[in-house]
Image (spheres, grey):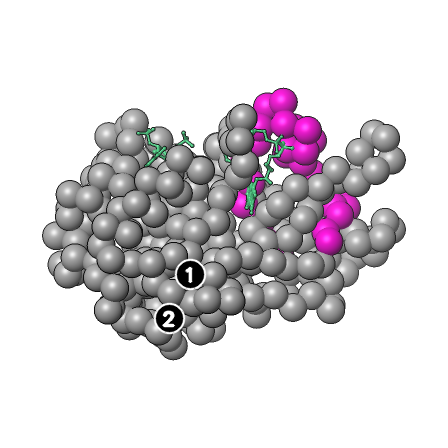
Amino acid sequence: MTESVTMDAARTKPHLPDAQIVTSVKHWTDRLFSFRVSRPTTLRFRSGEFVMIGLMGDNGKPLLRAYSIASPSWDEELEFYSIKVPDGPLTSRLQHIEPGDEIILRPKPVGTLVVDALLPGKRLWFLATGTGLAPFASLMRDPEVYEKFDQVIMMHTCREVKELEYGRQLVEGLENDPLIGEMVQGKLRYYPTTTREEFHHMGRVTDNLASGKVFEDLGLPKMNPEEDRAMVCGSLAFNVDVKAILEGFGLREGANSDPKEFVVEKAFVGDGI
Ligand code: FAD
Ligand code: A2P
């Protein structure tokens, strides 16, 4: 299922404070959609950061949730990649937005998945499940990433093939991108896998790292702290398991204030956490 609608952002002006106008919406599956909104002229962010976005609640108060900005920092609009939680307070409504609608966006970007939080290295690994791809959709389109690293590897795992489609189209479009196509060519390696549907590459990110299969498939050396850097974004369980594997390879977790070999961020806050 792929529906797409667009409009010119200049046609309408927002009314609410901190409001932005929706310019396009694309539904990828019955659980996933992406959309673009106008960008506040004053908003500066680092690729990989997240902001609070939402809609006005029935009680007249903003209903806000954390969302990674999926577009790169040079883009004149902002893009988001979203889950549709059937009874989710925000996404049960957000999934119905259309071009011309308003959303609320608090222009205070934050987050740990930034290049500044890593020490210099040779290869940069992006490790994601589900909508955890979103911050990497931004970083994969950022020239700074290709200036700082010789190779960039995007590992993305979902249950089914159709859930990989947003990422696949994004990566495949990059080589022909007029702005960064040349920088990306030969540097970006894409390693999508599924866990519950037949696909040419299968298995959890954790299993493919721990078994060494991904290194074999891509012809790369086993991860090591001298050359490899990583950014991790998935469910809490995924993040915990990947962190243990990266530490097993000798990489250490860093932060904005203390750059090291890898950084982690939650793609969402799970049930009971
Ligand atoms: P909520 O009440 O927020 O969530 C209900 C339940 O749905 C959760 O307990 C969890 O089990 C499940 N859930 C929520 N979000 C997801 C998800 N993304 N994938 C799978 N299950 C989920 N969500 C996005 O869709 N895109 C993003 O780019 C994104 N970035 C985030 C960045 C950070 C730092 C954090 C903490 C969360 C992010 N989220 C993102 C999750 C987002 O904040 C909301 O939880 C989500 O939009 C659902 O909102 P809701 O009010 O409908 O349901
Ligand atoms: P699996 O199908 O083996 O559970 P979900 O849809 O549940 O959020 O999961 C998204 C993807 O992340 C699925 O492919 C799932 O694999 C995988 N996954 C879930 N938990 C972990 C984990 N702890 N470590 C590695 N991969 C995980």
Q: Residue at x 46, y 66 (%)?
A: 258
Q: Which mark is residue 254?
A: 1
What amino acid is labelled 2 in the image? Answer: Leu
Q: Which residue is mark 2?
A: 119
Q: x, y percentage for residue 49?
A: 56, 58
Crowd class of label 2 (few under 14; some 14 to 19; many from 20; radius 10 Å): some
Q: Is residue 31 left or right of residue 45?
A: left
- Assess whether mark 1 and mark 2 are in contact (beta carbons under 8 angstroms): yes
Distance from label 2 to label 1 (Cα)? 9 Å
Horizontal side, residue 252 vs residue 32: left or right: left
Q: Is residue 171 visible?
A: no
Q: Picture quarter containing residue 226? A: bottom left
Secondary structure of the residue carrying numbered label 1: loop
For ligand 1, give the image quadrant: top right
Q: Please indicate whether residue 158 sits to the left or right of residue 223 in the image.
A: right
Q: Residue at x 28, y 51 (%)?
A: 246
Q: In x, y percent, where is residue 94?
A: 67, 36
As drawn, 185 above or below 129: below
Q: In terms of sequence position, does the residue under pointer 2 or pointer 1 come before the other?
A: 2
Residue 174 occupies quadrant: bottom left
Q: Residue furthest top?
A: 87
Is the shortest distance between ligand 1 and the CB of mark 1 under 8 Å? Answer: no
The answer, for residue 211, to whether it is visible in the render is: yes
Q: Establish if 193 lies above or below 222.
A: above
Q: 109 and 241: which one is in front?
A: 241
Q: Is mark 2 within 8 Å of ligand 1?
A: no
**Does the magenta run of residues contain 51?**
no
Instruction: Give the camera-side residue of 19 and 44.
Output: 44
Query: What segment carries the magenta color?
Result: 78-106
Examine the structure image and report whether residue 90 is included in the region drawn in magenta: yes
Residue 46: x and y, percent? 56, 66
